[in-house]
Image (spheres, rainbow, N blue to C red):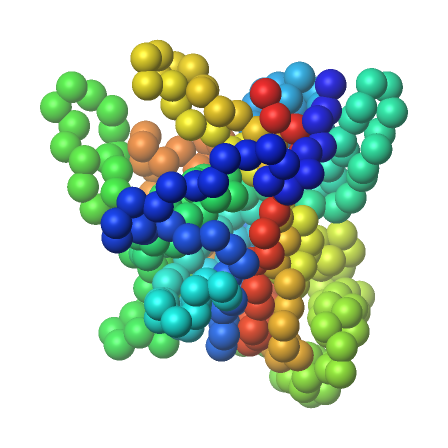
């Protein structure tokens, strides 16, 4: 049965060791640039993965259903981040590569659905900041891993890329180390005929963040883009980061690491705190290196080499809010 718990109800205080590497949220990010693309995936594999991560651990108390055979891949530059209640301790930067599964989640109590909403599950998230990695995993339940992210603006860069810690093939003498995970290179530009209309809709800011999201959606959903399969109506709703994110937060047991000493399905949200500026990003070639240590193509049903659809590049300020528990073992 689902258990929706009040925040912090009946819990003991957290004991900070000297030199703490995690702090409580919320976390504020300024001058963020996020570039998102759509990748075609295998819907059955997406459902299998969400069942494994959400429905099966919770015994059906929380369910997540991918809506379409797509994932959203986002490269994000966060140059100025700080913990809102500990702003006097300084700022930090990070870069992230995230692959998210858009869909619908439900929370069930008995035979009744007590909560239902669009949401995002992110089974793969790579970043270069150790504090953000540990905070994301421990506080929220993000499955964050270490990764070195390169952006088109970097000197000598040919586009986007991510290098992770892993190995190509599992065997007894496999040596783990830095390994290229993915590369993206621009294949074209936004057509000149559409560029003026898109710039009018996307190159300017809006008075409200809701209007910004709707403006981005409407501008992407042109007849040409729909006919060419570059974007779909539902996917367009997920390109601005304001939807609930669903996690499996868990820790291995010290006596038997095959079991979890703590396990919960949790949820949090990013809130836009500035008026975003959104522009269309052109198609990119996409190459994914097969790594046994990071089997993204197998888990999501992605082609190892393909071309992205049109994407969006968003400039904004945003805040990661404190989350809540949807179910706990």
Residue nearest the viewer, comparing 242 with 28 = 28
Q: Which residue: 65% across, 84% down?
A: 203
Q: Residue at the far right: name it.
A: 112
User: How far across and how far down the image is residue 31, in percent?
Assistant: 49, 77
Total number of numbered discs in the rendering:
0
Q: Position of residue 161 (x, y in %)?
A: 35, 58
Q: Residue at x 76, y 77 (%)?
A: 208
Q: Nearer the viewer, residue 121 or 200?
A: 121
Q: Nearer the viewer, residue 45 or 34?
A: 34
| Residue 326 x %, y % | 67, 34
Whether 264 is drawn above or below 26: the answer is: above
Answer with the quarter of the image where residue 121 lies.
Answer: top right
The x, y position of residue 294, in whole percent, is: 36, 36
Q: In the figure, residue 50 lies in which quadrant?
A: top right
Extreme-top residue of the structure: 256
Q: Is residue 297 left or right of residue 267?
A: left
Residue at the spot 26% in from the left edge and 38% down from the top edge: 166
* Residue 269 visible in the shown view: yes
Q: Quadrant of the C terminus?
A: top right
Residue positioned 49% across, 24% down in the render = 262
The N terminus: image quadrant: top right
State left or right for residue 27 relative to residue 111.
left
Q: Is residue 236 left or right of residue 184?
A: right
Q: Is residue 11 above or below residue 244?
A: above
Q: Is residue 300 visible in the rendered structure shown here?
A: no
- Looking at the image, is 120 positioned above or below residue 64? below
Say which of 28 and 170 sits in front: 28
């Amino acid at each position: 049965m689902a258990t929706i718990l009040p925040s912090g109800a009946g819990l003991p205080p957290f004991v900070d060791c000297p030199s703490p590497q995690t702090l409580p949220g919320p976390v504020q990010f300024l001058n963020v640039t996020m570039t998102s693309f759509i990748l075609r995936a295998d819907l059955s594999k997406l459902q299998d993965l969400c069942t494994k991560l959400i429905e099966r651990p919770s015994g059906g108390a929380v369910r997540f259903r991918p809506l379409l055979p797509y994932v959203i891949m986002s490269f994000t530059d966060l140059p100025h981040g700080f913990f809102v209640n500990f702003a006097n301790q300084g700022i930090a930067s990070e870069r992230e590569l995230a692959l998210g599964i858009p869909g619908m989640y439900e929370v069930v109590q008995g035979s009744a659905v007590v909560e239902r909403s669009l949401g995002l599950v992110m089974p793969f998230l790579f970043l270069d900041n150790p504090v953000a990695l540990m905070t994301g995993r421990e506080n929220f339940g993000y499955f964050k891993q270490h990764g070195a992210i390169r952006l088109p603006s970097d000197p000598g860069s040919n586009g986007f890329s991510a290098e992770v810690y892993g190995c190509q093939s599992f065997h007894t003498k496999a040596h783990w180390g830095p390994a290229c995970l993915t590369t993206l290179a621009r294949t074209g530009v936004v057509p000149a005929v559409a560029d003026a209309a898109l710039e009018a809709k996307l190159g300017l800011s809006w008075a409200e963040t809701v209007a910004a999201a709707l403006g981005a959606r409407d501008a992407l959903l042109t007849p040409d883009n729909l006919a060419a399969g570059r974007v779909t109506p539902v996917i367009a709703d997920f390109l601005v980061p304001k939807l609930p994110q669903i996690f499996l937060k868990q820790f291995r047991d010290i006596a038997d690491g095959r079991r979890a000493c703590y396990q919960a399905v949790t949820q949090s949200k990013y809130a836009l705190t500035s008026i975003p500026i959104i522009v269309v990003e052109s198609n990119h070639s996409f190459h994914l290196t097969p790594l046994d240590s990071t089997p993204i193509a197998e888990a999501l049903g992605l082609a190892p080499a393909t071309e992205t659809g049109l994407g969006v590049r968003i400039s904004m300020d945003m805040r990661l809010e404190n989350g809540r528990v949807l179910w706990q073992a």
